[in-house]
Image (cartoon, helix red, strand yellow):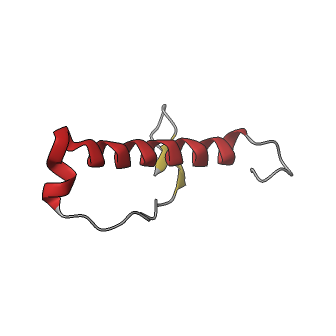
Amino acid sequence: ISVRRVNDGAVLHASYLEYRGAEQKFTTWAADDAHSFRAEIGFAEREFGRAILQQYMTPPGEGGR
């Protein structure tokens, strides 16, 4: 995950998402219109959003910047 300033592209924050799901074969991820894959992508999006909100929207002294 990286957060960049729009006007000049400077990186304001960068980190990674550690995947914690169970290992799956590609055919399992692709089955049922890629339902498993889409669910994992949704999880990642929520985690990214949570991390960004915590980093930039939490008042000082409450776990944010």
Q: In x, y percent, where is residue 56? A: 67, 42
Nearest the eye: 51 or 3: 51
Which residue occupies 36% across, 49% down? 40
Nearest the eye: 28 or 64: 28
Residue 52 found in image quarter: top right
| Lateral position of residue 61 relative to residue 16, left or right | right
Which residue occupies 30% across, 68% down? 23
Q: How many marks?
A: 0
Nearest the eye: 60 or 42: 42
Question: Which residue of the protein is positioned furthest toward the top in this rendering?
Answer: 7
Question: Which residue of the protein is positioned furthest toward the bottom in this rendering?
Answer: 23
| Lateral position of residue 14 relative to residue 53, left or right | left
Residue 45 found in image quarter: top left
Question: Which residue of the protein is positioned furthest toward the front in this rendering?
Answer: 32
Nearest the eye: 22 or 41: 22
The correct choice, above or below, for 6 with respect to 63 in the image is: above
Q: In x, y percent, where is residue 39? A: 36, 44
Which residue occupies 68% across, 46% down? 54
Question: Which residue of the protein is positioned furthest toward the left in this rendering?
Answer: 27
Q: In x, y percent, where is residue 26? A: 16, 59
The correct choice, above or below, for 62 with respect to 7 in the image is: below
Which residue occupies 46% across, 59% down? 17
